[in-house]
Amino acid sequence: MPNIKTAIASYSFHGLLGEGKCDVFNYLNMLRYRYGVDCADIWTGFLPNLDDGFIGKVRAELDRKNLTLANLCVDGPHVWMDTAEARDAHKKQMLEYIKAADKLGAKTIRIDFGGTEGHTMPDEAFEYIVNTYREYCAICYDLGMKIGPENHWGWDRVPEYLRKVKEAVDSPAYGHLYHFRNFYDDVEAGEELAISYAMHTHIHANSMPYAKDVIRRLAKAGYEGAYSAEHHSGALECERVEWQIATVRGLIAELNAEGWDEPAKPSYFNGIYE
């Protein structure tokens, strides 16, 4: 049986954050005392600053609650911007996030390609993206972390671009945050590629009808990261996240009972919702 770790992405509570009802410390309390998961998955919207004092307090709470930071999910800076000045500014900010990730003990970091889905990635952008990830990977390798994109917007959702960048970067510190089946085109190719080098996962609510077999395939491929529920509705978040992480746990329990080497059987949950 694979070593299964579960997490809940802090983005799941972005509605509460926006209303001033939840901060990173409330989130960590919920992980430990309400949901009982193994790992945190912090979206940078929950980090209002990167001051050493603040990051130190977050790390202390992670340690006190015996939580591992599976992923630091970086929004804001991404790799490609249309002007050199903007690219430099985003790189400067990202290097600060990598330092913060190290202080927080993060296992993985997500930063996106940038770009616009449906638009061709220019050669200039490809070369810059590859070279920038090589720089980040060199740093992260020495820190014992992985870094890579997530297929949730822009060029990150195009399997061919993901493949080309992965092959060109060619680093053991380069990985992928797999947002289940969220590709702009060629979903099967995208899924096969993402599973092959996944460093972290986001299991969204709409994926529940097919998530069981994706989880099985990840485990069979040797994935050792966390299975992280990410909720998006922005409403009734505490209750809906409770349903979502319970369903993920139920799918994992079914796979344990059936055997991970066997094809996944139709889930009990699917029958209920039909």
Image (spheres, rainbow, N blue to C red):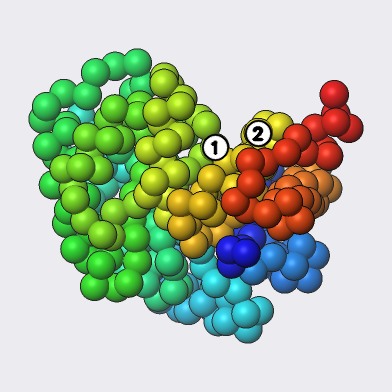
Q: Is residue 125 left or right of residue 191?
A: left
Query: The N terminus lies in which quarter of the figure?
Result: bottom right
The furthest residue to the front: 262
Answer yes or no: is residue 134 visible.
Answer: yes
Residue 132 image point, x, y percent? 18, 48
Q: Amino acid at mark 1?
A: Phe
Given residues 226 and 231, the one toward you in this image is 226
Q: Is residue 167 left or right of residue 31?
A: left
Residue on which the image places disc 1: 180
Q: Residues within 10 Å of mark 2 (few under 14, many from 20)?
A: some
The residue drawn where x is 48% and y is 79% is 56
The disc, 2 or 1, on the residue closer to the chain's N-terminal end is: 1
The residue drawn where x is 49% and y is 62% is 224
Q: Nearer the viewer, mark 2 or mark 1?
A: 2
Whether 122 is drawn above or below 76: the answer is above
Residue on which the image places disc 2: 210
The secondary structure type at the circle numbered 2 is helix
Residue 86 image point, x, y percent? 21, 39
Whether 252 is drawn above or below 142: the answer is above
Residue 16 image point, x, y percent? 71, 48
Query: The C terminus lies in which quarter of the figure?
Result: top right
The residue drawn where x is 35% and y is 16% is 118
Spatial CA distance of label 2 from label 1 is 9 Å
Image marks 2 and 1: residues in contact by CB distance under 8 Å? yes
